[in-house]
Image (cartoon, helix red, strand yellow):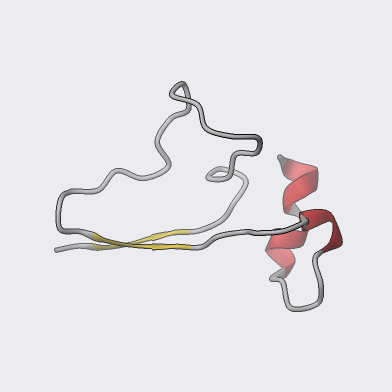
Amino acid sequence: MTDHHLSATCNTLHLNGFSATLKPALVVKSGDRVHVEAVSGSLYNADDKAPQSWCRLPRNL
């Protein structure tokens, strides 16, 4: 079993729904564990608890 970590970055985030045309951000095998970093709420009004890298996301998406 392999552990994976999927970070919330400009390369892994997509706004406005799902699309089958998007390249997978991560490929895993059955039985692997995935830890997903998620962004929720308004990135434009991120409070001081949000990581600084998340505060730059709207400008880079």
Does residue 42 lie above or below 26 as drawn?
Answer: below
* Residue at x-position 59% and y-position 34%: 17
The C terminus, quarter of image? top right
**Residue 27 quadrant:** top left
Instruction: Report whether 16 appears left or right of 46.
Output: left
Residue farthest toward the bottom in the current orientation of the protein: 49
- Please tell me whether residue 56 is drawn above or below residue 23 in the rendered image: below
- The residue under the point 72% across, 58% down is 41
Residue that protrudes farthest toward the right in the picture: 45
Q: Is residue 13 left or right of residue 20?
A: right
Name the residue furthest top. Answer: 21
Picture quadrant where residue 60 is located:
top right
Residue 38: image location, x then y, percent: 55, 60
Q: Is residue 48 left or right of residue 35?
A: right
State the quadrant of the N terminus.
bottom left
Residue 59, by quadrant, is: top right
Q: How many marks?
A: 0
The residue under the point 56% across, 56% down is 8
Query: Residue 49: x and y, percent?
Result: 74, 78
Q: Residue at x 52, y 32 (%)?
A: 18
Q: Position of residue 35 (x, y in %)?
A: 38, 65
**Image-based side of 31 in relation to 58, left or right:** left
